[in-house]
Amino acid sequence: MAKEKYRLQPVLDVRGQAKQAAACLVAAKRELLAAAQAELLRRQQALAGCCQRQTAVQEKMLGEFDSSAEARTLVTYRTHLADLRRMEQELLLRVDEQCRACDSAEVEVEKALNALIEASKEVQVIEKHRENWRQRVQRDERRREQRVSDEIGAIVHRRNRTQ
């Protein structure tokens, strides 16, 4: 007798492909999250560097102020400090923007993970069904073989009795 073919194999194939697509999506979303976190770190470092430059310029200005520097030099320092403060505010905005981007990327990763989990569950359901089907087919095959063996045994027994 020809071997039976699992009738839900196309469904299993489609769900397996959906699971693979979900896994690829998770990987892509994780890469985007890593890139967003790296950019956030870079922006935070730029902000820290700006704050350090501000501190250094302010200390230098105060040092020259104590040594009775020219007013023009002090005005130049104040202008430079104002520029650094404006840059700091701009960097703060960029850091906040990147924090929101990281949060959004984390949400996207979670959504992708949930989709992957759901796809995995769907594949497991079909695989469990296929395994139960295989067991049922094997059990039926064993029963058929047993019936054939019983019939052969009964025929042999009748022949032996009639002889």
Image (cartoon, rainbow, N blue to C red):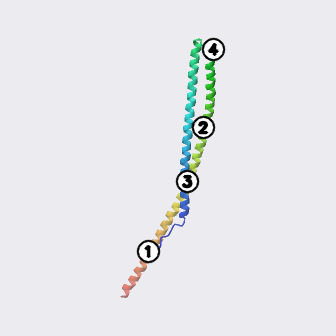
Q: Quadrant of the C terminus?
A: bottom left
- Secondary element at image label 2: helix
Q: Is residue 33 left or right of residue 155?
A: right
Given this view, does label 1 or label 2 mark the residue nearer the observer? 2
Q: Quadrant of residue 39?
A: top right
Q: Is residue 102 above or below residue 139?
A: above
Q: Which residue is identified by label 1?
A: 145
Q: Position of residue 106 (x, y in %)?
A: 58, 43
Q: Which residue is identified by label 3?
A: 21
Question: Is disc 3 in contact with disc 4, using a CB cutoff of under 8 Å?
Answer: no
Taking the spot 55% from the left edge, 39% from the top edge, the residue there is 37
Given this view, does label 1 or label 4 mark the residue nearer the observer? 4
Taking the spot 56% from the left edge, 33% from the top edge, the residue there is 44
Precedes in sequence: disc 3 or disc 4: 3
- Secondary element at image label 1: helix
Disc 4 marks a residue whose amino acid type is: Ala
Q: Which residue is identified by label 2?
A: 98
- Secondary element at image label 3: helix
Q: Is residue 104 left or right of residue 2?
A: right
Q: Position of residue 94 (x, y in %)?
A: 61, 34
Q: Which residue is identified by label 4?
A: 71
Q: Quadrant of residue 107?
A: top right
The front one of 137 and 13 is 13
